[in-house]
């Protein structure tokens, strides 16, 4: 039961304001091409199948060239909420740049 977050107790006005802000932010991000094509989560019309296809396609393309292929898959369901994202990205970039492979974040 510790994995579940409580149901939101926001008032109706807060929920309406949240929806308005989300739509404006989403429109701004999409119209200015701020999100990368590798951003699959929380986007309208983009599904897990797109992420799986993209990953599979990148791996197969790299293997056909031939290039090294590596992957790190972590289950960060609860941990991600308490991780300093800046430090995590800096460490991943530092470690990954020691090899000549692109880092997809």
Image: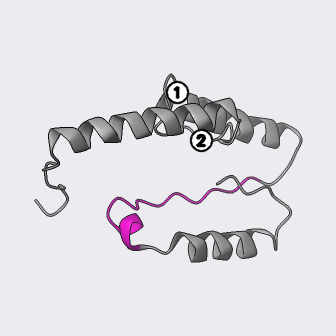
Find numbered disc 1 in the image and state the secondary structure of the residue it sits on. loop
User: Few, some or many C-alpha atoms within 10 Å of disc 1 (few <14, some 14-19, many ≥20)?
Assistant: few
Residue 2 pos. (x, y %): 15, 64
Q: Earlier in the sequence, mark 2 or mark 1?
A: 2
Q: What residue is at 35 percent from the left and 58 percent from the top?
A: 77
| Along the viewing direction, whichever of 29 and 48 lies nearer the viewer | 29
Q: Verify CB contact (< 8 Å) between mark 2 and mark 1.
A: yes
Q: Is residue 70 above or below residue 11?
A: below
| Along the viewing direction, whichever of 55 and 24 lies nearer the viewer | 24
Whether residue 46 appears in magenta in the rendering, the answer is no
Give residue 31's quadrant in the image.
top right
User: Few, some or many C-alpha atoms within 10 Å of disc 2 (few <14, some 14-19, many ≥20)?
Assistant: few
Find numbered disc 2 in the image and state the secondary structure of the residue it sits on. loop
The extreme front residue here reads 13
* Residue bearing the label numbered 1: 46
- The quadrant of the picture occupied by the N terminus is bottom left
């Amino acid at each position: 039961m510790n994995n579940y977050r409580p149901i939101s107790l926001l008032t109706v006005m807060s929920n309406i304001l949240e929806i308005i802000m989300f739509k404006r932010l989403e429109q701004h991000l999409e119209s200015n091409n701020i999100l990368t094509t590798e951003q699959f989560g929380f986007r309208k019309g983009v599904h897990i199948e797109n992420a799986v296809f993209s990953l599979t396609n990148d791996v197969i393309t790299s293997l056909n060239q031939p290039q090294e292929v590596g992957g790190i898959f972590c289950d960060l369901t609860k941990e991600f909420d308490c991780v300093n994202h800046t430090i995590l990205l800096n460490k991943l970039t530092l470690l990954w740049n020691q090899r000549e492979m692109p880092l997809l974040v």
